[in-house]
Amino acid sequence: MKVEKLNQLELKFETADILPPPFSHQILLTLDFKEKFIDTKFEIAYTYRDELTDEEILEEGFTGNEDLAWAGELSKAWEAPILNLISKSPERFNTKALEEEQNFLEININKSFKGNPQNQEAWEYLLQELTQAVYETYGKEAPFKMIFKKIDKAKSTSTFELNLHYTDRRVEAYSILESGKSQKKVSWEEASDLLQNVFIGDFITDKAMKNEPKTVGKFLSVGDGFWYEFTKSLKNPNGNRAYIVNLYEMFESYL
């Protein structure tokens, strides 16, 4: 899709019918592109929660106060990746009826190009990133931090730390070895690819540790207050027997 100048982008999203409350939600995101910032309006509303009791909502890890309406400024750092995705999006929109397991997504570019994009998965991922950027800019959430830690039989520790600042698409990455701490050059795209690989795994919270590990093993912290041990509380997802091995090799390359 060719757009000479991006003035406005609107994204409407709703989770699939098959997703129950308290997880089901709707998002409306409007971006107006100014010279030095992106004027932003963001709304998220969780749906059908009146079907649940307050206790049922809390049991799923929610507070019941997740709805948010926010207006403010996002960094211009987001303009280039948005334009890049637009350029990769077919001009012809999807016209097929939604299946029960499909999310609803509609984009509106400059109030001229409106519809469901054929590359919906890529747009959904961008919306997730922009939502995180809103939450960080608003102060609802801190920058994302992930830590990989390896402890060998000699009690030697190797650590890789990844920090993602969604406010301005900035990556800070470090390897920490016995010899000291060094900064790693990791692009945003590379970090996003790593995260996508991480979160297809099977994270078993009931078997995870709350305290930082001191014993021999390979561990991962993804910012939820737990440490997951490879093959024990972090396991291969169904149909992917090579996940743990491949993920370990990815982290090894950063040490």
Image: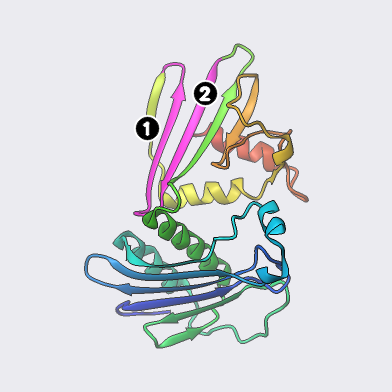
Kindly identify the residue that appears in the image at 67 percent across and 46 percent down: 201
Question: Would you say residue 255 is visible in this rendering?
Answer: no
Question: Would you say residue 232 is visible in this rendering?
Answer: yes
In the rendered image, the quadrant that contains the N terminus is bottom left
Q: Is residue 191 left or right of residue 81?
A: right
Which amino acid type is shown beneath numbered disc 2?
Ser
Q: Position of residue 47 (x, y in %)?
A: 63, 71
Tag 2, which secondary structure? strand
Instruction: Please tell me whether residue 202 is drawn above or below residue 62 in the rendered image.
Output: above
10 Å neighbourhood of mark 2: few (<14), some, or many (≥20)? some
10 Å neighbourhood of mark 1: few (<14), some, or many (≥20)? few
Which amino acid type is shown beneath numbered disc 1?
Gln
Q: Position of residue 150 (x, y in %)?
A: 58, 25
Kindly identify the residue that appears in the image at 43 percent across and 77 percent down: 10
| Figure quadrant of residue 103 | bottom right
Return the residue at label 2.
158
86 or 225: which is nearer to us? 225
Q: Examine the structure image and report whether residue 158 is included in the region drawn in magenta.
A: yes
Kindly identify the residue that appears in the image at 58 percent across and 26 percent down: 212
Instruction: Please tell me whether residue 154 is drawn above or below residue 47 in the rendered image.
Output: above
Cα separation between marks 1 and 2 = 14 Å
Kindly identify the residue that appears in the image at 35 percent across and 79 percent down: 3
- Specify start and end residues of the magenta stretch as a single range: 156-179
82 or 211: which is nearer to us? 211
Q: Main secondary structure of the magenta part?
A: strand
Going from N to C along the chain, the mark reached first, 1 or 2, is 2
Q: Position of residue 73 (x, y in %)?
A: 31, 64
Return the residue at label 1.
183
Please, which residue is most extreme toward the right here?
Answer: 239
136 or 168: which is nearer to us? 136
